[in-house]
Image: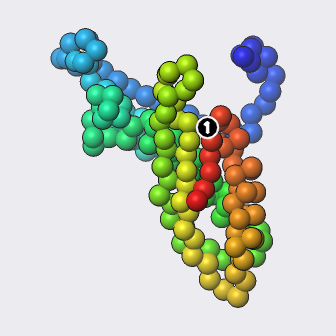
Amino acid sequence: MVNPKNRATVRPMSEHKATLTWSRGDSGFGYKEYPRTHTWHFPESGQSLRAAAAVEFLGTPDCVDPEEAFTAALASCHMLTFLAYAAMNGYTVDAYRDEAVGYLEKAEDGRPWLARVVMHPRIEFSGGKQPTPKQLEKLHEKSHHECFLARSVKTEVTWA
């Protein structure tokens, strides 16, 4: 574990803030009573998003749950890194679609964790320079190894 006091001397490259707000309202506070719905607010962009636990954990189906957001964040980071490397290598990307799936599994100790995220990127290129399947695989590998978020988690992140 990192001692937070030692981190004060490290100058971050950037900061990323989120404010979470939740209120019990008129609900009781028994495990099956209290609401899981809350708000994520991102002060830099001014965006807000309703979130809740996954439906399987008494959440609300019309809200984003943390596991979905984690999956989307990893896929988004991979895509943004991929687009940067594609541009640097002279490829023109017209469209990128990924139907990423995060898998909540039980760990060896029996507790759940988001063990795997499998991305399914489909990319449309245009122009005279088109990547071969091997070059495309190398772009994904480089993107994976350089993605800030993939480098920050122990979850297995792959693509198919």
Residue 15 drawn above or below residue 33: below
Q: Residue furthest bottom?
A: 128
Q: Residue furthest left?
A: 26
Image location of residue 74, percent across then percent down: 58, 46
Q: Residue at x 50, y 53 (%)?
A: 100
Residue 43 vs residue 123, the one in the foreground: 123
Q: Residue at x 48, y 49 (%)?
A: 101
Q: Quadrant of residue 123?
A: bottom right
Q: From where the camera sits, is residue 94 visible?
A: no
On the rendered structure, is 94 left or right of 48? right
Dot 1 falls on a residue whose secondary structure is loop
On the rendered structure, is 159 left or right of 132? left
Q: Quadrant of residue 83?
A: bottom right
Image location of residue 62, percent across then percent down: 27, 43
Q: Residue at x 79, y 16 (%)?
A: 6
Residue 157 vs residue 90, the one in the foreground: 157
| Kind of residue at badge 1 | Thr
Q: Residues within 10 Å of mark 1 (few under 14, many from 20)?
A: some
Q: Residue at x 33, y 28 (%)?
A: 57
Residue 102 vs residue 2, the one in the foreground: 102
Residue 77 drawn above or below residue 20: below
Q: Quadrant of residue 61?
A: top left
Image location of residue 68, percent across then percent down: 44, 42
Image location of residue 88, percent across then percent down: 77, 68
Q: Which quarter of the rendered picture does the C terminus lie within?
A: bottom right
Numbered marks: total: 1
Residue topped by disc 1:
155
